[in-house]
Amino acid sequence: MPPNPGPRAVRDRTRLLAFPRPDRAAVVVGGGALAARRAAHLTRSRTPVVVFSPTLCDDVFDLLVEHLVTWENRWPTPRDLRRAWLVHAATGDAQLDARVCAMAARVREQRG
């Protein structure tokens, strides 16, 4: 058996989405470290970023204080997702992430 090469480096593909969409926001669901990284990358594209989470880690709070993101102190609804061009679920809870993804898929199907 060949030796295990170790964990593969995971590339952050969020930077590939860096094009401005000033007419529609990117939605990040979650307030932890992963959500903070995704939101920070998305702010570089000059696209409005809305974070939905009842709690925020320090890094997301810093983005909020710097007026780089807006914050909704709740989980998103389908109406919130209809206005988004991108939804990134990063809550740290696999079941909640799956529900957010399913809701986003239903919204996308309704949009046609």
Image (cartoon, rainbow, N blue to C red):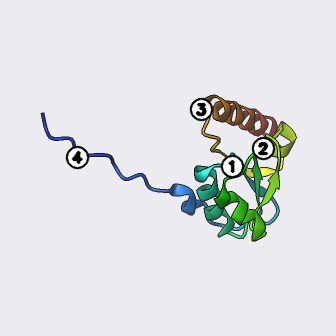
In the orientation shown, which residue stands out farthest toward the left? 1
Residue 71: image quadrant is bottom right
Q: Which residue is mark 1?
A: 31
Task: Assess disc 4: are there few (<14), some (14-19) or many (≥20) residues with their C-alpha within 10 Å of its C-alpha.
Answer: few
Observer-nearest residue: 68 or 73?
A: 73
Residue occupying the point 65% across, 35% down: 97
Residue 41: image location, x then y, percent: 61, 63
Report the disc number at residue 5: 4
Q: Disc 1, disc 3: CB below 8 Å? A: no
Residue 1: image location, x then y, percent: 12, 33
Residue occupying the point 78% across, 69% down: 67
Whether residue 92 sits left or right of residue 43 in the image: it is: left
Cα separation between marks 4 and 3:
27 Å
Cα separation between marks 2 and 4:
39 Å
Mark 1 or mark 3: whose residue is earlier in sequence: 1
Q: Which residue is mark 2?
A: 54
Mark 4 or mark 3: whose residue is earlier in sequence: 4
Cα separation between marks 1 and 4:
33 Å
Cα separation between marks 2 and 3:
17 Å
Report the disc number at residue 94: 3
